[in-house]
Amino acid sequence: MEPSLHSHGSEGARWQRWGLALVICLALAYAHLVSAAALSVGEKSLLFIRLDFEDIPGDPVPQPKAAEVMKTVGDYYRAVSDGKLRIETAFTPTLRMPRRAAWYATHHPERDQDAHAAAKAAGFNPAGFDLEIMVFNVAVHGDGVGIQGGKGVWLAPPIGFYGVVHELGHNFGLPHNAVWKTWDGSVSGAGTAATYGDPYDPMGCGGDDPRNHFSVRSKRLLGWWGPGDIVNVKQSGTYQLYAQDLPGAPGPRGLRIQSNATNVYWVEFRQLISENPYLRNGVLIYKCYADESGRVDMTLNLLDMTPGSPLGCTDAPLLLGRTFADDAAGIYITPVAKRGTAPESLDVVVNLGHYTSNHPPLLRLTASTRSPGVGQPVVLRAMTNDPGEDSLEYSWDFGDGSFEWGKPVVTHTWKADRDFAVRCSVTDMKGGSASKLLLATVGHPTLHRLVGALTSNGKPLANVLVAADTTHSVFTDSDGLFALTDLASGRHRIAAPHTWGWWVPPVSVDCPGTESIRLAAVPLKPDAIWSDRGIELEGDDVLSTPAHFRPPVEITIVAKTSATNLRIGYAADQVIFNWEGDGNQLRVDGGPASGQHRPGRGAVPPNRYVTIRWVVTPKSQAIFVDGDPRFRHNGDYSGIDRPVSVFTYESTVTVKSVGVKQLPPGTQ
Ligand SMILES: [Zn+2]
């Protein structure tokens, strides 16, 4: 295997739209991940080489600090590997490099040779160690670099637990973990990997919290787990799954479900992050290419069951009593009950097949009272009728961070004077489901509530995220109804910012004063959006074409911004005009031209419509503003297949039109 480098630099603005990590790893290349566990199993020796320079003298990290970090790293790897990996670290004193620091910034092989020579002269034999970390007191290559699938980590101070665990993870062969972001607001449909976004894994943005274990697929690949730890699900059934982050499981800790020739789902259960009720009462589902598929990209993608919610990945888990459905592949996954074992385990029902004649269940919800006092028990009852007489599973979300599952009748008490939106959902575990919201007004709330309906041509739109500002949100129920609670006094902007295939004009309401509203969704044409008055985008609003396109295409956008951040997406995750950091610079993030920002080419006049023409062929992209060429880049654009989007950040962007014209095949 060819090792490749992963370097970490700071590029904070890149994913701010998705609220992801501040530190971004730049993946220079992916090596195919092999299961050779040579480096990740057994007693491994690590040489920690500290280096300084004549022009920047001094300890890059004091010996006690280095020892403390490596102790926590060693303890962590021992725990997450079930004792299979033990790392013994030797530390050099701080060694003087023969040349000045700046020279090494562009001479990496010489840097390594000189560092090894210095270690040798100090009585260490670098070749005799399995692993190696070099620490320099300057940022020699971003914040950190780890060779993927080989020996060697370079780090710049400050040295911390997370940076070391992460870079060693690259040494062991792991790529980054991502969060899957779909174009259409679904959980697992067509979309893109937001690399580095998984907050539960050290190969994502797991940070310094040692309770973030490696995902089950990684534990298997690294040789820490045997075949008995993973169930390869090939038929429908109920599978018991033990918490993967606690020791002593007597049974399987991961499910692997192949969805087609190249794709796999991984299912796992965690208990260690005890303050997260979603993790404690649900499963994480990842998707990736099958390890034997020969695909080069081995990214593991966390699926977020509540895409777009303000909680980010906190509520990514699939809660007990709810179903994740991949209708195309015929895969239905439902965690149904905790077992109360030690360590904790739960049962997961997996149904494999195409249930084409299945009908969704009907659901009605009642409460013994809708305005209980604080601490007063309320009986909630779900009345269901399944046309196919399938067995049903129930999921209750009481709106206060507590959940219940498996029962049609539950009793709950709330502990605060507040409005709570209760959600009950019912699933037949074969793709049919229904959900209902019920508003409980507990005691005497001091804040405000708002109920409403989201419809299109009179028909309810279900499972759409409705948000008050960017802080409060709720998914509509099967009747298109929503209830927003805990709203402060004042004006609120109620929007459905990610509605796919529709545009929902936001409504501004004053609290107190408004109790209920209606949101009316306007259907969008697949390739042409047009509005006389202009569609106003604020906050998290994204205006997307319902269709996705392959080059060659010509995109024409007529839009204006009130101040900063007119942003467009297609051949890049975002092209930013009037970037808030430097309005003159044209920023290009993501895609084949990622990072190729253009000084002096990014400004557009505020409050005036401009016509942006974006021509993308399989070999190039070019951007014009009112006919003025702003950006051109040659590269491989043949793999682009996504919708066109317009959005903003901290400004109001108004869109008059978006049009996409497919150019004749062969257009270069
Ligand atoms: Zn990395």
Image (spheres, rainbow, N blue to C red):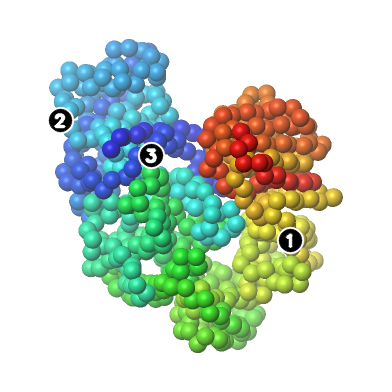
| Residue 334 appears in the figure | no
Considering the numbered disc 3 on the image, is that residue within a helix, a strand or a loop? loop
Element at badge 2?
A: helix
Quickly name the residue at label 3: 30
| Residue type pointed to by label 2 | Gly
Return the residue found at the far right: 532
Which residue is pictured at 58% across the width and 75% down the height?
435
Packing grade of label 3 (10 A; few <14, some 14-19, many >=20) is many
As measured in the structure, the alpha-carbon distance from the residue carrying label 3 to the one carrying label 1 is: 41 Å
Is residue 638 found left or right of 46 in the rendered image? right
Residue 128 image label: 2
Sequence-earlier tag: 3 or 1: 3
Give the answer, above or below, for where 456 lies relative to 1: below
Alpha carbons under labels 3 and 2: distance apart: 27 Å
Q: Is residue 263 left or right of residue 340?
A: right
Residue 510 — which label?
A: none
Q: Tell which circle, 2 or 1, labels the residue nearer the N-terminal end.
A: 2
Real-space CA distance between mark 2 and mark 1, rounded to the nearest whole angstrom = 66 Å
